[in-house]
Image (spheres, grey):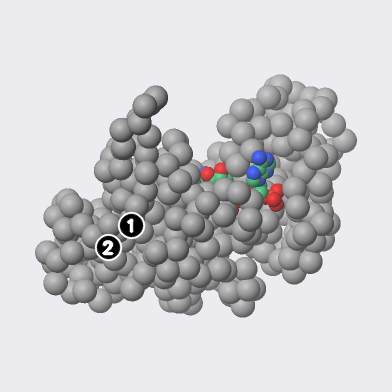
């Protein structure tokens, strides 16, 4: 589609009347392009993906979509049709992760998008459009977290690192990046029986059963980890902090388990542990480019292919339900055009 002003196929989240409280439903619709509103850059979307946040939005759960009606999809990879941003010309491949998409801006689960390109980056040269979307926000967040650990001074000589939610999108890519950088990676998972081979293939050297960290123990525990990439939050994060070595760094990325953090100040004041927050949504272009450079340089793209499931736009909502039911692992790529 290169004409501006036609129809767009999109997954739209709408508020629907219900007996108790308003509820949200996502459906695949044909909308007029004017529905997408203004946006200095028009993109023909080729690929999007299903991240945890997409799964919440596509199944009508709260926490992501802040206004309705809204096109879902926190990621897009596509070609520029027109742009008011001097960095992009028609035909250029462009990547946009987060930046309010599917929160208060229309997102990437559509054949076309009207975006503010300020936080978009050119598709990295070494990555195909499909692989960039397969990596998506999860991969780029994992790269932000790994970069943060390294920037804070954590090195493979300091000891093993822990990755939580390891079979998920953020966890899988973080495991791969850390292993490639020479770290000994312990993968924490609730599905060790099913995914031992998978995690080993990504580069994990040991597996930790999620149950070992799922009830909060002592404020200071045996110091095991030089660094942590946490996608889970809650008691798992609190225990990971309590098990971090003096001077270690914990990158908090997610809340797949819980948004709570039942901890004390002990790891911070007695071991000098750093709790580093990772925000992919509003990261600035420089940080985005560095994260994508890391992915281009250090990721085994064949392994990425092996952990990617591809679905069409029509299959995105069902894939989101599977993700929240714990029936998927790795990454879900949505092929659109
Ligand atoms: P996925 O659903 O792909 O993976 C989450 C993983 O967490 C699961 O595979 C599972 O791993 C584990 N998990 C699921 N439920 C629970 C539970 N109840 N308790 C403990 N562990 C659980 O999600 P993503 O990897 O895409 O995202 C992970 C988190 O990171 C989400 O909360 C997401 O919102 C957040 N996020 C934050 C970003 C940021 O900017 N900070 C950007 C991207 C994601 P296993 O079975 O191996 O234990």
**Residue sitting nearer the eye, 302 or 84:** 302
Residue 65's label in the rendered image is none
Q: Residue at x 39, y 24 (%)?
A: 20
Left or right: where 65 falls relative to 248: left
Q: Position of residue 270 (x, y in %)?
A: 77, 26
Give the camera-side residue of 45 and 35.
35
Residue furthest to the right in view is 222
Residue lying at 63% horizontally and 56% vertically, measured from the top left: 327
Q: Pointer 2: what residue?
A: 9
Q: Is 35 displayed left or right of 215 in the figure?
A: left
Question: In the displayed structure, does residue 273 sit left or right of residue 54?
Answer: right
Q: Label 1, on which residue?
A: 28
Q: Residue at x 37, y 39 (%)?
A: 24
The answer to whether any part of residue 185 appears in the image is yes
Residue visible at 57% across and 54% down in the picture: 322
Label 1 sits on a secondary structure element that is: strand
Q: Position of residue 184 (x, y in %)?
A: 79, 58
Which structural element holds mark 2? strand
Q: Quadrant of the C terminus?
A: bottom left
Callout 1–callout 2 Cβ contact below 8 Å: yes
Cβ of mark 1 under 8 Å from ligand 1: the answer is no
Q: Quadrant of residue 67?
A: top left
Q: Position of residue 90 (x, y in %)?
A: 21, 74
Say few, some or many: other residues with alpha carbon within 10 Å of mark 1 (under 14 / 14 to 19 / 20 or more). some
């Amino acid at each position: 589609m290169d004409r501006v002003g036609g129809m767009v196929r999109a997954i739209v989240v709408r508020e629907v009347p219900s007996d108790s409280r308003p509820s949200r439903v996502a459906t695949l619709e044909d909308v007029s392009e004017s529905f997408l509103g203004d946006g200095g850059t028009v993109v023909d979307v080729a690929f999007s993906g299903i991240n945890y946040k997409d799964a919440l939005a596509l199944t009508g759960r709260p926490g992501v979509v802040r206004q309705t009606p809204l096109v879902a999809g926190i990621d897009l990879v596509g070609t520029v049709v027109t742009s008011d941003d001097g960095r992009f010309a028609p035909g250029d491949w462009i990547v946009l992760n987060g930046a309010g998409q599917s929160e208060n801006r229309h997102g990437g689960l559509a054949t076309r998008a009207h975006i503010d390109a300020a936080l978009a980056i050119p598709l990295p040269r070494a990555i195909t459009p499909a692989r960039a979307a397969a990596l998506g926000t999860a991969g780029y967040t994992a790269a932000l977290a790994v970069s943060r650990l390294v920037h804070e001074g954590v090195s493979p000589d300091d000891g093993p690192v822990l990755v939580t939610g390891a079979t998920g999108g953020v966890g899988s890519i973080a495991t791969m990046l850390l292993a490639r950088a020479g770290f000994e990676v312990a993968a924490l998972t609730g599905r060790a029986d099913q995914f031992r081979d998978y995690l080993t293939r990504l580069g994990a050297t040991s597996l930790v059963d999620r149950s070992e960290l799922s009830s909060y123990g002592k404020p200071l525990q045996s110091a095991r980890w030089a660094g942590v990439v946490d996608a889970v939050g809650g008691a798992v994060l609190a225990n990971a902090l309590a098990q971090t070595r003096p001077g270690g760094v914990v990158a908090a990325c997610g809340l797949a388990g819980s948004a709570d953090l039942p901890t004390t100040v002990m790891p911070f004041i007695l071991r000098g542990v750093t709790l580093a927050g990772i925000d992919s949504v509003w990261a600035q272009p420089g940080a985005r480019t560095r994260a994508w450079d890391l992915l281009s340089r250090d990721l085994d793209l064949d392994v990425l292919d092996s952990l990617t499931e591809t679905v069409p736009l029509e299959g995105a909502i069902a894939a989101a339900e599977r993700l929240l039911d714990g029936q998927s692992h790795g990454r879900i790529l949505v092929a659109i055009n």
